[in-house]
Image (cartoon, rainbow, N blue to C red):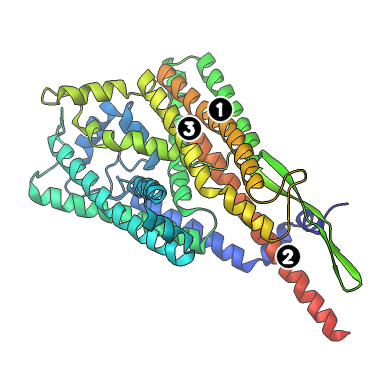
Amino acid sequence: MASAAEQLAANINFGAFAKAEELKARIWFTLGALIVARIGAYIPLPGIDSAAFAAIFSQHAGGVLGMVDMFAGGAISRMTVFALGIMPYISASIIMQLLTSVSPTLEAWKKEGESGRKKINQYTRYGTVILAMVQAFGMANGLQSMAGPSGGAVINPGMMFVFVTVFTLTGGTMFLMWLGEQITARGIGNGISLIIFAGIVSRLPTSLGQLLEQLWAGSISGFTVLLFAVVAVAAITGIVFFERAQRRLIVQYPKRQVGNRMFGGESSHLPMKLNASGVIPPIFASSILLLPLTVAGFYGTGADTPGWLQDAMAYFGHGQPLYIVSYIALIVFFAFFYTAIVFNPEDTADNLKKHGGFLPGIRPGKNTAEYFDYVLTRLTVVGAAYLAVICALPEILIANYAMPFYFGGTSLLIVVSVTMDTVAQIHSHLLAHQYEGLLKKSKLKGRRG
């Protein structure tokens, strides 16, 4: 027999959506915020010669800068006020989460609940400002040294340009960070992920057009396009399958007598996702790999470029063995690291014991925590392998067949996962709205009775 929640979910339709005023307000707010983020990606940085910079960028777009530009939603190729994107905030979040694991003070804040989370978020914002200023300063110096056939990228180089660039780019990153937090609090879905999602999706039509132009011009064959389409469909299917996969652990509650009646004795299940870390590992891994190379990419391959920098750019180019190995290693590391943050076996076992629940055949307490850790480790191994294959294999194909970055595994994973997460949140809001409607009807019937 279907449960009440399943029956209610089956009855959700467009009529229920039309009546959910709060949900519609959240969706409109999210759309409006994303439109603002996209508008900012077209506001040029002061002092930049757009034509000269576009010519220079086209020479290096196939390397690391193309990948950075994908996460920035095309803001780097146009050199706009959002050129740094949200990556400094992601890097600061990585640093804070790593410090939380080794710092007793931060660990204590984490256990304080909402107040501790606010303190950690505040220090994450401070870290974002510092990282953004450092990257913006390096980017400003790099822009001043860039020159192409049509001249330099900067109209009037100097200290004033550096100051304005650092101030503008840092402000753009902080605005995106604030916008992402507002979407999370007042909209639908995770704000930071949605901003990256919007940037990737906005470039898909252009990338498809370029792909068709290459096909008509004969620079790529129809077989290559067909092969990539098959890989993309297979990747999307795999993402949907693995993101929805979960291991359900049966939880039993003992019977207890209250007066002359018996309560409890019911069984439930504890769902453990195969990929509990979601899209965080690929984003974090890309952020770590792109952070030291973001500024270096702007120096190109000029005669004044240091030798070690040229070697780093060559070794960490897309499709290179060192880049792929580092990318996979970071994905695996962050898959385990972030899973350990979002799911604590000891806390889960203690909460289960406090409520009288237990796993059949396993003693409550320490043994249950060890079993949780055992199951979670096995699931994370499979989940990390899935993320590594989904993200690394298309990157190799992109490097070998000159496909746009926007069809890569990381971009597909972000687009599909964020879409699924947002739809799930919309579904949850609709369920809550339906429950509220049922409660109001029952209260009215009770008063009439």
Alpha-carbon neighbours of circle 2 within 10 Å: few (<14), some, or many (≥20)? many
Q: Which residue bears the numbered disc 3?
A: 332
- Of tags 1 and 3, the one toward the viewer is 3
Alpha-carbon neighbours of circle 1 within 10 Å: few (<14), some, or many (≥20)? some
Q: Which residue bears the numbered disc 1?
A: 232
First of labels 1, 3 by sequence position = 1
First of labels 3, 2 by sequence position = 3
Query: 220 left or right of 423?
Result: left
Is disc 2 placed on a helix, strand or loop?
A: helix
Measured as percent of width and height from the top left, residue 46 is found at 19, 50
Task: State the separation of the CA atoms marked 2 and 1.
Answer: 37 Å
In this rendering, does residue 430 appear at all?
Answer: yes
The answer to which of 100 and 119 lies nearer the viewer is 100
Q: Which residue bears the numbered disc 2?
A: 434
In the image, is residue 322 above or below residue 123?
above
The answer to which of 279 and 118 lies nearer the viewer is 118
In the image, is residue 132 above or below residue 304?
below
The answer to which of 324 and 232 lies nearer the viewer is 324
